[in-house]
Amino acid sequence: MNNVTSKFNSLREFIDYAEANPVDNRGSSDKESSEFAGGTASLAEAVGMARNGWNAVRPDVDKMLATIKESFGERFAKVNRTKVGIAGGAVHMGRFIAGRPDHMVGFHRMPSTRHGKVVRLLVDYGANAFTSADAMRKRGCTLTVLVDALATLGLSVELWTETTVHMGNKSHTTLIKLHDSREPLDINDMMFALAHPSMLRRLTFSVRERAMTLRVARGSSYGSSVPVTQAEALESDVVCNRIEHGGTDKLMVSDPVAWILQTIEGLGV
């Protein structure tokens, strides 16, 4: 089998690569329906959203996180927190380069025995064509809350995403380092990557088209997603499997809060 891997060291690098896909090489990444892609009408619109931020699921994230905090009680009482805004003691370089006014980072330091511990997450964001955009958003919201909860507990999070597909005698892996544990975490920057269907169905499709010189007609297959291939190499502490064929933990679907609490407990924190 011919295996191709497209690896990106940041979300920005991934977005730039997807955007640079020549127009005449684009298939579903630019032409598939808005409903299928979760509300974006084109690759350009999805790129803009990925760069500028998308926080439509913020109320759901906050509601679920409040329940998590209540369940964990005192564990959330004293942690190290960061806040991104127009003032602060450090510059968030990604936002600064993008020209966003809210590019300053403020630090609120409080004692925590967990501070400095790194948790490495690998999220499989693959989903086959019959998976609804709503199901992708709901799962992404749960994953966002998990990341937010870990950071709120004072843990340093290294976050990777992967999706691998088979297409005939070819295999393609998209691997992205969404967040480095040494950098301040702004959960708002993670929402598009974890919860918006266009992360897969516009940007990642564009990466596949470009990396594999794959121009597929609208409605044709962009491959069948398979389990992650990079978990061992990354020495992942938590692997969140793909959404279809029972790959996603059933508890994540039936009781997201219970799944998050179980996952955190499993890390021994």
Image (cartoon, rainbow, N blue to C red):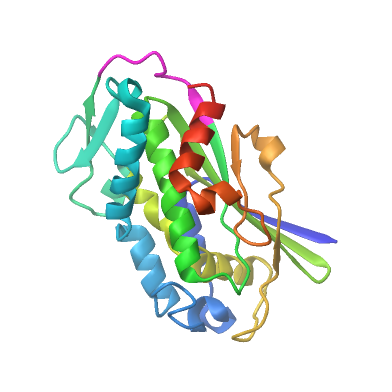
Question: Quick check: is 192 in the magenta stretch?
Answer: no
Picture quarter with the N terminus: bottom right
Identify the residue at image location x=52%, y=54%: 253
Which residue occupies the foreground of this view, 229 or 183?
Answer: 229
Is residue 130 visible in the rendered image? The answer is yes
Instruction: Tell me if I can see residue 185 in this picture.
Output: no
Count numbered badges in the picture.
0
Q: Is residue 84 above or below residue 31?
A: above
- The answer to whether 193 appears left or right of 62 in the picture is right
Residue toward you, 205 or 257: 257
Q: Which residues are magenta?
A: 110-119
When the figure is inspected, residue 114 is found, relative to residue 252, above or below; the finding is above
Q: Quadrant of residue 53?
A: bottom left
Side of 46 relative to 229 (left or right): left
Please give the name of the residue rendered at 50% of the width and 56% of the height, measured from the top-left corner: 14
Instruction: Identify the residue at image location x=60%, y=32%.
Output: 237
Point out residue 123 in the picture as x, y percentages from the top left corner: 56, 47
Position above or below: 89 against 174? above
User: What is the x, y in percent for residue 179?
Assistant: 45, 41
Q: Quadrant of residue 170?
A: bottom right
Where is residue 110 shown, x and y percent of the image? 25, 18
Assign the magenta stretch its main secondary structure. Answer: loop
- Residue 129 sits in quarter: bottom right
Which residue does the image show at 53% across and 35% down from the upper left?
A: 263
Q: Residue furthest left?
A: 87
Image x and y of residue 164, in percent: 68, 57
